[in-house]
Image (tube, grey):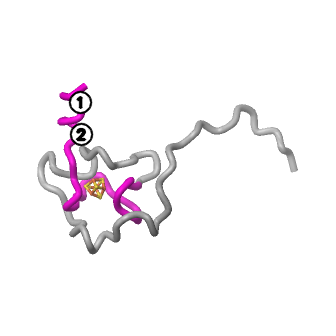
């Protein structure tokens, strides 16, 4: 067994523990429409296929009641 793996893995963002995030049922997790989807949401964590607000595996084409536009954030910067 070798312990040499070269460079350390890049750091991934961390999500809050599942119990600190909302269950999908409570936020009506469902298929998204047009721009209103997880892939365009400020809470989506694509590297983890997760969300900072909602627990469980999150798919980019879906959406929930907690959606907030990533485009809006970029306009503010
Ligand atoms: S739409 Fe809901 S589930 Fe999807 S990333 Fe945003 S907050 Fe999370």
Residue 17 horizontal side relative to residue 42, left or right: right
Name the residue at the left extreme.
Answer: 34
For the point 25% across and 25% down, the residue is 77
Magenta stretch, residue numbers: 50-77
Whether residue 40 is situated above or below residue 64 in the rendered picture:
above
Query: According to the image, label 1 marks what residue?
Result: 74
Is 32 covered by the magenta stretch? no
Which quadrant does ligand 1 occupy? bottom left
Q: How many marks?
A: 2
Q: Position of residue 35 (x, y in %)?
A: 15, 45
Query: According to the image, label 2 marks what residue?
Result: 70
Q: Position of residue 15 (x, y in %)?
A: 47, 53
Q: Residues within 10 Å of mark 1 (few under 14, many from 20)?
A: few
Closest to the observer: 47 or 42? Answer: 42
For the point 26% across and 46% down, the residue is 41
Whether residue 15 is situated above or below residue 22 in the rendered picture:
above
Q: Position of residue 12 (x, y in %)?
A: 53, 43
Q: Residues within 10 Å of mark 2 (few under 14, many from 20)?
A: some
């Amino acid at each position: 067994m070798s312990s040499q793996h070269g460079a350390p893995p890049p750091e991934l963002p961390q999500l809050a523990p599942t119990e600190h995030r909302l269950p999908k049922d409570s936020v009506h997790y469902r298929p998204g429409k047009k721009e209103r989807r997880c892939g365009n949401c400020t809470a989506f964590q694509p590297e983890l296929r997760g969300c900072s607000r909602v627990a469980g595996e999150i798919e980019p084409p879906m959406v929930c009641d907690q959606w907030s536009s990533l485009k809006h954030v970029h306009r503010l910067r």
